[in-house]
């Protein structure tokens, strides 16, 4: 009997994240066995030294792909946020950065009919049961990777991939405003925190930086343990309000990636992580997202689209600190720790009528870094 099983895989950078992409038929059918195999591939200790994970939430991400059985989609994609040293994989949310690699992966694996110069790939995300259309640049039958489109947080340029999210409202909870209100007050050890909970592509709890004594332009390494504890407590309290967990303290283990927590503040000047200046005139507001109990080094795609839409919705925490420019334009510009990020959203709202999201799109890049075989202990497959 073999000691290890070979699993065909590719490592792909999608946006500002990186993950292992595996075709579903390469993995065990039993979900529990499959999770143990995936955890083995990533490495189960805090350094992920015995696997492909990079000991960072942005590189401990997983994509499982197969042809979709739905007539409305070409590809089925399941995202997993692989816990680092926790023995748990969170499937409660989608990841838009990893999503940006799914279309190119499908093209290069021959899972879709290819057209040039762009191939439209209809992706069904199982985490949210939503369709996303990826417009993938193609050249000589392969996904194009080289280009001059630049995203902050990734060195160099790449080929521009447009992601257009369909029916984005209520992706996880079934409602744009899951609590029925545009603002709520969450009770935590710091007192009552004004919060807006919005679900567009993914549920997000928004707070203003000033509500927790922050300036809004902090970098990830500048947060203290006390601040990290408070922010996770707020996120956990939002998770209980949504019915995701029974107690706030349960959220870190049971649903560490959903809901997301995003801290916003009015546009201001600051220095990004690489030392470049972010100018107030070039952004509509500042955002800081929490990812797996740490501050995101850039900004998430799904949470970012939710943030951009929330900036258009009167009465939300995000709208309160957003520039007038974003209210008049389709493009919303967010300042994040590594620079800026643009989202393309259109919202129709009238008194007494539920807001309609007419557009929720974002541009990303992706690159296949390697392909080959990952090795997992054979005993995981056969149960001994």
Image (spheres, rainbow, N blue to C red):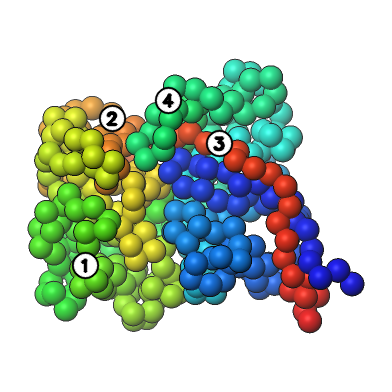
Which residue is identified by label 4?
A: 149
In three-dimensional space, the C-alpha distance between marks 2 and 3, rounded to whole angstroms, equals 25 Å
In three-dimensional space, the C-alpha distance between marks 2 and 1, rounded to whole angstroms, equals 33 Å
Q: Earlier in the sequence, mark 2 or mark 1?
A: 1
Which residue is identified by label 2?
A: 331
Residue 121 rendering spot, x and y as whole percentages: 60, 34
Q: Earlier in the sequence, mark 2 or mark 3?
A: 2
User: Residue 191 sits in which quadrant?
Assistant: bottom left
In three-dimensional space, the C-alpha distance between marks 1 and 3, rounded to whole angstroms, equals 34 Å
Circle number at residue 160: none
Residue 47 rendering spot, x and y as whole percentages: 49, 67
Indicate left or right for 366 with 65 as reference: left
Q: Earlier in the sequence, mark 1 or mark 4?
A: 4
As helix, strand or loop, the secondary structure at mark 3 comes to: strand
Q: Earlier in the sequence, mark 3 or mark 4?
A: 4
Which residue is identified by label 1?
A: 224
- What residue lies at 81% left-to-right and 70% top-to-bottom? 3
In three-dimensional space, the C-alpha distance between marks 3 and 4, rounded to whole angstroms, equals 13 Å
Q: Is residue 361 visible?
A: no
Image quadrant where one finds the N terminus: bottom right
Residue 71 rendering spot, x and y as whole percentages: 67, 41
Which residue is identified by label 3?
A: 367
């Amino acid at each position: 009997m073999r000691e290890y099983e070979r699993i065909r895989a590719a490592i792909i950078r999608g946006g500002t994240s990186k993950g292992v992409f595996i075709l579903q038929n390469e993995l065990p059918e039993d979900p529990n066995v499959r999770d143990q195999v995936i955890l083995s591939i990533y490495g189960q200790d805090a350094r992920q030294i015995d696997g492909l994970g990079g000991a960072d939430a942005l590189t401990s991400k997983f994509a499982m792909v197969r042809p979709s059985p739905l007539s409305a989609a070409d590809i089925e994609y399941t995202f997993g946020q692989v816990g680092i040293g926790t023995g748990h994989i969170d499937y409660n949310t989608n990841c838009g950065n990893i999503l940006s690699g799914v279309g190119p992966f499908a093209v290069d694996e021959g899972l879709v009919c290819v057209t040039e110069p762009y191939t439209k790939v209809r992706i069904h995300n199982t985490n949210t049961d939503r369709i996303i259309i990826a417009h993938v640049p193609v050249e000589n039958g392969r996904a194009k990777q080289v280009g001059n489109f630049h995203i902050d947080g990734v060195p160099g340029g790449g080929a521009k991939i447009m992601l257009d999210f369909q029916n984005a409202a209520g992706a996880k909870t079934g409602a744009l405003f899951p609590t029925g209100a545009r603002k709520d007050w969450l009770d935590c050890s710091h007192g009552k925190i004004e919060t807006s909970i919005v679900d567009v592509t993914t549920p997000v709890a928004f707070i203003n930086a000033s509500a927790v004594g922050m300036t809004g332009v902090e970098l990830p390494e500048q947060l203290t343990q006390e601040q990290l504890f408070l922010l996770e407590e707020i996120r956990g309290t939002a998770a209980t309000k949504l019915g995701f967990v029974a107690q706030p303290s349960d959220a870190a283990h049971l649903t560490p990636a959903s809901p997301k927590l995003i801290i916003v503040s009015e546009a201001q000047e600051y220095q990004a992580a690489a030392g470049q200046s972010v100018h107030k005139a070039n952004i509509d507001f500042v955002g800081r997202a929490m990812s797996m109990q740490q501050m995101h080094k850039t900004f998430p795609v799904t949470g970012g689209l939710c943030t951009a839409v929330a900036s258009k919705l009167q009465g939300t925490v995000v709208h309160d600190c957003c520039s007038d420019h974003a209210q008049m334009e389709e493009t919303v510009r967010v300042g994040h720790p590594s620079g800026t990020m643009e989202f393309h959203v259109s919202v129709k709202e009238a008194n007494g009528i539920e807001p309609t999201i007419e557009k929720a799109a974002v541009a990303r890049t992706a690159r296949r870094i390697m392909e080959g075989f990952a090795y997992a202990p054979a005993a995981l497959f056969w149960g001994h």
